[in-house]
Image (spheres, coloured by chain):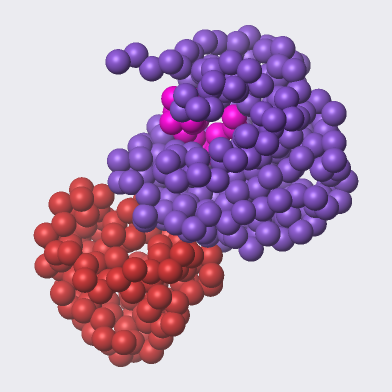
Chain colours: A purple, B red
Amino acid sequence: MIEPITGRYLRLALEGRPHRLYFEEAGQGIPLLLLHTAGSDGRQWRDLLNDAEVTARFRCIAFDMPWHGKSSPPEGWQEEEYRLTTAAYTGMVMAVARALELDRPVVMGCSIGGRIVLDLAAEHADALRGVIGLQGSAFVEPYYDTAMLHHPRIHGGETCAAIVSGLVSPRSPEAARWETLWHYMQGGPGVFKGDLHFYKGEGDLRPKLARIDTARCPVVLLTGDYDYSCRPEDTLATAEAIPGARATIMPGLGHFPMSEDYASLRRYLLPVLEEFAEQG
Amino acid sequence: MILPVESLPARIAATPALRRWGRYLDADVLLEVGAAAWLLTVRDGQVLTVRRGPFVLPSFTLALRLDPAGFARFLAADPPPGWHDLMALRRHGALKLEGDLVPFFAHLFWFKGALALLREGAKP
């Protein structure tokens, strides 16, 4: 069987530097731009890209961020430390949308992606149909030293996977749980740590929440209750600070709902996508 | 809370995945749950000895100090969300780490799996 997903490379400039990004897509209709979690890649969206009920009405696009998956770091990467910032991340998402000529996409991201959609809603409301944040909140307090994720005496792949292993719900299907962790084991050295620079430090979006106008850019947050990084209370507090935002807690799911248990996620996600489809 | 710590050497030895995750782990691990303490001598991921405290100025590579109430939630046969993993306990402040943390993070799958073997109904 050949899946309906196609993969291609996109050449574009990000922050003034040439990049070669890998993206996968499936479906036709309203553009739905998909953002993976820190330290992983677009494979997390494999089940959604194979969901005919979604792809019948949405052009679903999942790209690997620079340094992740099959996207290369920019030329000269060996001279620098990778550190994701809010401005670079938002600029990247908008640049990909422009390069692919997406007309007011819905942007859905998970974890760091669930965080950055809040910045996108605040800064680019009129260029988007709306945003969906999975496991999204405006800020997460650090609870371990991320230096351990990039250390010469520690295997980065195994430790990055072990760090996030408990964020996967124990109720999710075992094969999908371990595939989710395999993606972490394949991350480049220091990349997960570099993403967490945004997630656990620089990217505190709490001051921006009041600026989000959900009449122009609807905000929907979906969070699994086994996530102890972005906890249900973190998502609910974020939604509370955004007038008009909607939040739903998903019992039994963890930090990677689209990858660890898509069948359970889609029960919550499809009604949300249906609303965007009806609005056209 | 009665913890079957003395059974850990056999339980770990009978768990092939832990033998693999811990294959290079050498550490003297002090495990504290409230006032109770054990010192585990770990070599190549196998627990060679378990000594029960109390100790006077014990020497260790790293110490895991657990809040009894939080650890009890972790040890439930079906732990509640947010209390189901060692790093979840860390997030809630119910786990404090001390000493050389490199062996802990380098073998994090081992530490998570080994302590989960203390769970009610854990196999083997």
Q: Which of A45 and A95 is in front in this view?
A: A45
Q: In which quarter of the image is residue A84?
A: top right
Q: Which of B38 and A201 is in front in this view?
A: A201
Residue A14 visible in image: no
Is residue A35 shown in magenta?
Answer: yes
The vertical placement of A232 against A64, above or below, is below
Residue A166 place in picture, x, y as percent: 42, 55
Is residue B61 shown in magenta?
Answer: no
At x 50%, y 27%, the residue is: A53
Q: Nearer the viewer, residue A161 or A26?
A: A26
Q: Quadrant of the C terminus of chain B?
A: bottom left
Residue A38 place in picture, x, y as percent: 55, 39
The vertical placement of B26 against B68, above or below, is above
The vertical placement of B57 against A159, above or below, is below
Residue A187 place in picture, x, y as percent: 45, 33
At x 36%, y 44%, the residue is: A177
The vertical placement of A157 against A241, above or below, is above
Query: Would residue A127 appear left or right of A226 to someone viewing this image?
Result: right
Q: Quadrant of the N terminus of chain B?
A: bottom left
At x 22%, y 77%, the residue is: B5
Query: Would residue A50 appear left or right of A28 to someone viewing this image?
Result: left
For the record, the magenta segment spans A34-50
Residue B8 visible in image: yes
At x 11%, y 60%, the residue is: B14
